Image (cartoon, helix red, strand yellow):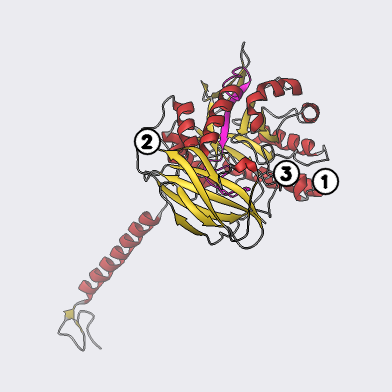
Amino acid sequence: MKSLNAPFKHPHFKLQVYPDDMQKIIYGIVALCLSLGSNAAAANKTPHAEPLQPIKVEVKKTEKGFQLLRDGKPYFIKGAGGTSYFHRLAAYGGNSIRTWSTNNAKSILDSAQKNGLTVMMGLPVTPERHGFNYDDSVAVKKQFDRVKAEVLKYKDHPALLSWGIGNELNLSYKNPKVWLAVNDIAKMIHEVDPNHLATTVLAGINKKEIDQIKATAPALDILAINTYADLAILPAKVKIAGWNGPYIVTEWGPTGHWEGLQTAWNAPVEETSTEKAAVYRSRYNYGVEQDQANCLGSYVFLWGQKQERTPTWYGLFTAKGEESEVIDVMQYLWSGAFPANRAPHIYGFTLNSQRANQSVYVKSGAVYNAEVDAFDPDNDALTYRWELLPEATKVGEGGDHEDKPETVKMTFKGLGKGKISITAPTASGAYRLFVYVADGKNKVATANIPFYVK
C-alpha cells in the first residue's frame, strides 16, 4: 500500500503533486468556478426596470369653454395621423400623433416619447360595415375583452394622451347598439386607466348621431371628428348638431375624393399639392383655430404616404419620403415660421392643353403634349418624374386598404422644362398621368390629370 503522503505521479508528465497540494488545487478550482458563475449570472441579469409613470391628462371646464391639460399644464394638440417620420413632426412644431390601432404600440409609444410627442392610441373596435354584428352579445363581449387587454398593456406609458375607440363606426352603419358598446369600453377605461381620456372617432357630424351618443354613450370624455372639405364650417356644424362639449379633429386634409369635382366618367379630380397647401392653411384657420372655446386641437392627415384613390391624394410625403408644400404650411401653422427650404410650387398642369377638371378624352395610340408649369421659391434646379397609372377600381371606404394599380409603361419624349409628348395607351379605359417636380433637396410638388382613352 502506498503511503498517504506519497506523491501523485502523472504517467505522461514529469509532475509530482502531493495530496495536500492537490487539495489546495481542487479548492482553488472550485472557488474559481463559483466566482466565474457568479460573475456570469450578474452579467446576464436584467437590470430592474423602473415602473412606467403615466402622465395625467384631463379636460377642464373654463369660463370660455374647455381646456386640455397634461400634467396640469395647457396642452393644445398640434398633431398628425400616421406612424412614421416622428422626428420630422417634432422638428416642425407638432406635438402628437394618432394611430388607428394598437399594432406595434410599444414601439410607437417609445418612439413618440423619445421625440417629445404624445399618442392618441386607436383601439381596434370593428365597424358594422366590416361585418360586425352589434346584436351578437358574445361577439361584443369578446371585442370588449380584447380591447381591455390592450388598454391594460399600454395605459401607463408616459407618451399616451388618449384612447380612440374605433374609427368612423358611424360610417354606413344601421345598428345604434354600437354606441352602447362604445360606452362600455369608455367606462372600462375610466376604471382601469384614470389618467387618460376616452373618445370615439366619427365620420363627420350630424344631429341624429350626436343625440344617440349623448343618450347612450355619456362616458365619453371628448368627441373626435374626421372631416375634410367641411373643416372650414366645422364649428358651426358642431353647434347645429347639438354638441356643446369639447372635441378634437382627428382627420382633416385635402378635399376628399367623394366631395370634389368629377370627370364625365366619374373619376374624382385631385387638387395639386399647391392647391392642397392653400386649402389646408385656410381650413385650419377657420375650422381649428377659430373655435378656441371647444376645439382642443387636431391631427392632420396623413403624416406618411398611402394609396387611396391615388398614391398622392392624402399623404403629405411621397413613397420616397419627399415632402410636399403642405408640410411647409403645417410647419408654419404649428411653429409660426416656414422652413428655410420651400417645396416647389405648381401653377398649372395640362394634357392636350386641357386641365384635370375638363374631362380629357384622347384617342388610342395618338400623341399628345403634357406640360406642368412649376417654379421653386429658392431657385433650386427642378427635375420632373412622370408616371402613368390606370384609374383605381378596387377601392375601399373610410380609408380601407387599397392596392396601388400597376404602373403602365409610358412612351414619351422630353420637350424641355416640364414638357413632354406622350403616346396614349392602346387599351381603352380610364388613366391618370402623374408628375412629380423635385428640387433635389427632398421637397416635391405633385399633380395628376385623369384622362380617358377612347
Circle 2 SS class: loop
* Residue 420 visible in image: yes
Q: Give the residue pinned by disc 3.
A: 144
Does residue 48 appear left or right of residue 349 in this picture? left
Q: Where's residue 76, x and y in %? A: 53, 25
Please tell me whether residue 220 is drawn above or below residue 355 in the rendered image: above
Q: Is residue 303 magenta?
A: yes
CA distance separating discs 2 and 1: 56 Å
* Residue 54 visible in image: no
Q: Is residue 27 magenta?
A: no
Q: Where's residue 126, x and y in %? A: 72, 46
The magenta span reads 287-315
Tell me the amino acid under the disc marked 2: Asn
Q: Where's residue 202, x and y in %? A: 70, 35
Q: Would you call the spot at circle 1 few (<14 residues within 10 Å), some (14-19), or many (20 or more)? A: few
Q: Quadrant of residue 224?
A: top right
- Classify the position of the N terminus by image quarter: bottom left
Disc on the earlier residue, 3 or 1 = 1
Q: Would you call the spot at circle 3 few (<14 residues within 10 Å), some (14-19), or many (20 or more)? A: some
Does residue 426 appear left or right of residue 109 in this picture? right
Q: Quadrant of residue 232?
A: top right
Disc on the earlier residue, 2 or 3 = 3
Circle 1 SS class: helix
Q: Would you call the spot at circle 2 few (<14 residues within 10 Å), some (14-19), or many (20 or more)? A: some
Please, which residue is most extreme toward the top here? 63
Tell me the amino acid under the disc marked 3: Phe
Q: Where's residue 297, x and y in %? A: 57, 27
Q: Give the residue pinned by disc 1.
A: 137
Q: Residue 375 versus residue 43: which sits nearer the camera?
A: 375
Q: Which SS type dominates the magenta stretch?
A: loop
Find residue 341 and name its label. Answer: 2
